[in-house]
């Protein structure tokens, strides 16, 4: 009975953490679209968190229906002349508009305004991440671990290059290394690439070339993953430096952290295309839910950090040039800017159908990858 109760509480924690993480990220993404749309004079019919049947909602003084729906896997802002939640234009609605209504039409706005409204969603996700990271840095400060080598794994890239215990890493590829975290960041984004290390060995400067090797390992949170490693650990008892951070520096650190997540994600995608990474590392809502529940067990600070990471990921994903995503709309607008006229309704309809099929296939593939998580929950 105790085991069953513990499992039930763990399930509730996972569900609550998942809903909190996704709702915050989706809300700010859609808020970005909404605020810029209002600024451009676009009439907004609905602001929805979730899809499907409405659970709760209200109308604001501008006639926008704010709603929470029963399927919390996303959200949307629907404009007056949208045919669907994907913001596809309704030609019939536009044709039958009065002059007053046409002034609030999204699809009749100048190209730059439409592009600004669409881009505002992903940008809001990046801003949210920067703000969260900045708050965490302001509250908890910055702690760095001296980049001094502890253990060197035999036959690892570091061992083959001649790295020895107690070596102090000074630079990698000309970039100054101030902490062990800097070292991990650079190594993790340069798999199978020769990196020039400058190390201090008892006062003697040495230059070593190390090629990080993609190695599969078991991650306590996300399961199996391939990560570039060089085969060293930090030295036990290495110097830790902690300092307080002012607001301006915290924002800069938050922007840097956001940039690192973006470059790391893009690096993973490139490695995936090149066959250096395995596609089984791609996950969907089930994996987000599982990780949310595990991170929540460590406290609110790690959960906030996870929200920031997910916010960056969702913002970046939405910028991919796939019709139906924000990036797909921006791609159509770029074509319109070159052609001096929009694509035909037929071409846009075909594009959105293709985009929907791609997104659906990715969702199915990600869900298939997440089946082991469902088995773990069931057990």
Image: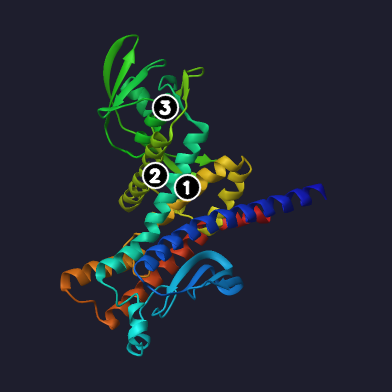
Up-down: is 28 above or below 214?
A: below
Q: Which mark is residue 308?
A: 1
Badge 3 is on which residue?
180
Q: CA distance from mark 2 to mark 1?
A: 8 Å
Extreme left residue here? 339
Label 2 close to label 1 by CB (< 8 Å): yes
* Horizontal relation, residue 32 to residue 174: left or right: right
Q: Residues within 10 Å of mark 1 (few under 14, many from 20)?
A: many
Residue 291, percent across and down? 56, 49
Residue 114, percent across and down? 31, 69
Display colour scheme: rainbow
Disc nearer the start of the sequence (2/1): 2
Q: Which mark is residue 258?
A: 2
Label 2 close to label 3 by CB (< 8 Å): no
Disc nearer the start of the sequence (2/3): 3
Front: mark 2 or 3 = 2
Task: Identify which residue is drawn at 50% across, 38% down.
Answer: 136
Up-down: is 66 above or below 277?
A: below
Q: CA distance from mark 1 to mark 3?
A: 22 Å
Task: Identify which residue is drawn at 36% across, 87% down.
Answer: 97
* Horizontal relation, residue 51 to residue 214: left or right: right
Question: Mark 1: which secondary structure?
Answer: helix
């Amino acid at each position: 009975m105790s085991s069953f109760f513990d499992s039930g509480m763990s399930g509730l924690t996972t569900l609550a953490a998942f809903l909190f993480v996704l709702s915050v990220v989706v809300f700010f993404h859609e808020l970005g679209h909404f605020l810029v749309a209002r600024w451009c004079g676009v009439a907004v019919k609905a602001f929805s968190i979730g899809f499907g049947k409405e659970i709760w909602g209200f109308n604001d003084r501008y006639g926008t229906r704010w709603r929470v729906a029963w399927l919390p896997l996303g959200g949307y802002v629907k404009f007056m002349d949208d045919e669907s939640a994907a913001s596809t234009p309704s030609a019939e609605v536009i044709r039958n508009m009065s002059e007053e209504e046409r002034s609030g039409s999204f699809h009749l706005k100048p190209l730059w305004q439409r592009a600004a409204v669409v881009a505002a969603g992903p940008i809001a996700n990046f801003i949210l991440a920067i703000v969260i990271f900045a708050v965490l840095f302001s509250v908890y400060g910055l702690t760095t671990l001296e980049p001094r080598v502890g253990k060197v794994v035999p036959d690892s890239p570091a061992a083959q290059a001649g790295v020895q215990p107690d070596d102090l890493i000074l630079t990698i590829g000309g970039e100054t290394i101030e902490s062990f975290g800097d070292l991990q960041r650079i190594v993790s984004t340069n798999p199978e690439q020769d990196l020039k290390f400058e190390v201090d060995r008892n006062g003697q400067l040495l230059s070593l070339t190390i090629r990080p090797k993609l190695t599969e390992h078991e991650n306590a949170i996300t399961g199996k993953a391939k990560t570039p490693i060089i085969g060293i650990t930090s030295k036990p008892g290495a110097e830790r430096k902690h300092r307080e951070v002012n607001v301006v520096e915290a924002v800069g650190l938050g922007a840097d952290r956001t940039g690192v997540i973006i470059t790391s994600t893009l690096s993973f995608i490139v490695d995936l295309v090149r066959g250096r990474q395995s596609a089984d590392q791609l996950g969907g809502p089930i994996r987000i839910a599982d990780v949310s529940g595990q991170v929540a067990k460590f406290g609110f600070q790690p959960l906030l950090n996870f929200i920031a990471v997910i916010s960056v990921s969702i913002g970046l994903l939405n910028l991919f040039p796939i019709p139906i995503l924000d990036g797909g709309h921006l791609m159509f607008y770029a074509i319109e800017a070159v052609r001096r006229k929009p694509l035909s309704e037929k071409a846009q309809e075909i594009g959105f159908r293709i985009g929907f099929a791609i997104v659906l296939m990715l969702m199915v593939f990600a869900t298939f990858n997440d089946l082991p998580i469902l088995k773990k929950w069931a057990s």
